[in-house]
Image (cartoon, rainbow, N blue to C red):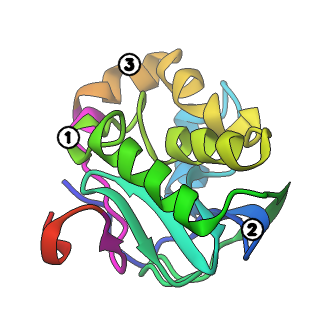
Amino acid sequence: MALSPGLPSFAYALAGHLSSYHHHCTLRSTLQDLSLFDSWKQLEGIWHTSIVVHKDEFFFGSGGISSCPPGGTLLGPPDSVVDVGSTEVTEEIFLEYLSSLGESQFRGEAYNLFEHNCNTFSNEVAQFLTGRKIPSYITDLPSEVLSTPFGQALRPLLDSIQIQPPGGSTMGRPNGQS
């Protein structure tokens, strides 16, 4: 099962040597309509994050690591852009690093909505580039959801979701094949 394009999102942007992330809120209206969360806590959304650096946006989904022009996924412009600092990492070194990640811990088949997702990727890459993490309210959300009875009941369905935001080119695959 894949999420439909056109849902809001979040990205951490890193333009040139400036590091930041974008984030898109997926499922916002659905979460706000679910009264089951009222007794637990109000969720702003389920965040999709990406990193923007060296004039491109990089993200991780069920197809592996992908890139596109900033804001170029079908999720549209991010709901928020957060500056995470500057980096001295050159584009060449960064692309070698991404290639290594794509062959190891961020292969498409390693994607898991709750335990190894776009936010895990954005956090890892932000730390590599700037030494800073993305906010814990984003990285902690999956465990918070799963700690509820509602989250546990939905886990089998949610585990089957494969998310690959459309609009990017998969990195490290011949001719963009996934």
Q: Amino acid at mark 1?
A: Glu
Q: Is residue 165 magenta?
A: yes
What residue sits right under mark 3 in the picture? 152
Q: Amino acid at mark 2?
A: Ser
Q: Is residue 121 above or below residue 48?
A: above
Front one among 123 and 176: 176
Q: Residues within 10 Å of mark 2 (few under 14, many from 20)?
A: some
What residue sits right under mark 2 in the picture? 80
Q: Is residue 77 above or below residue 31?
A: below
Label 2's element? strand
Q: Is residue 65 magenta?
A: no
Q: Which comes before the other along the chain, label 3 or label 2?
A: 2
> Which residue occupies 37% across, 67% down?
165
Alpha-carbon span between mark 1 and mark 2: 28 Å
Place of residue 6 in the rendered image (x, y in percent of width and height, measured from the top left) = 44, 79
Q: Amino acid at mark 3?
A: Gln
Label 3's element? helix
What residue sits right under mark 1 in the picture? 109
Place of residue 100 in the rendered image (x, y in percent of width and height, measured from the top left) = 38, 44
Q: Nearer the viewer, mark 3 or mark 2?
A: 2
Place of residue 24 in the rendered image (x, y in percent of width and height, measured from the top left) = 59, 64
Label 1's element? helix
Magenta range is 157-171
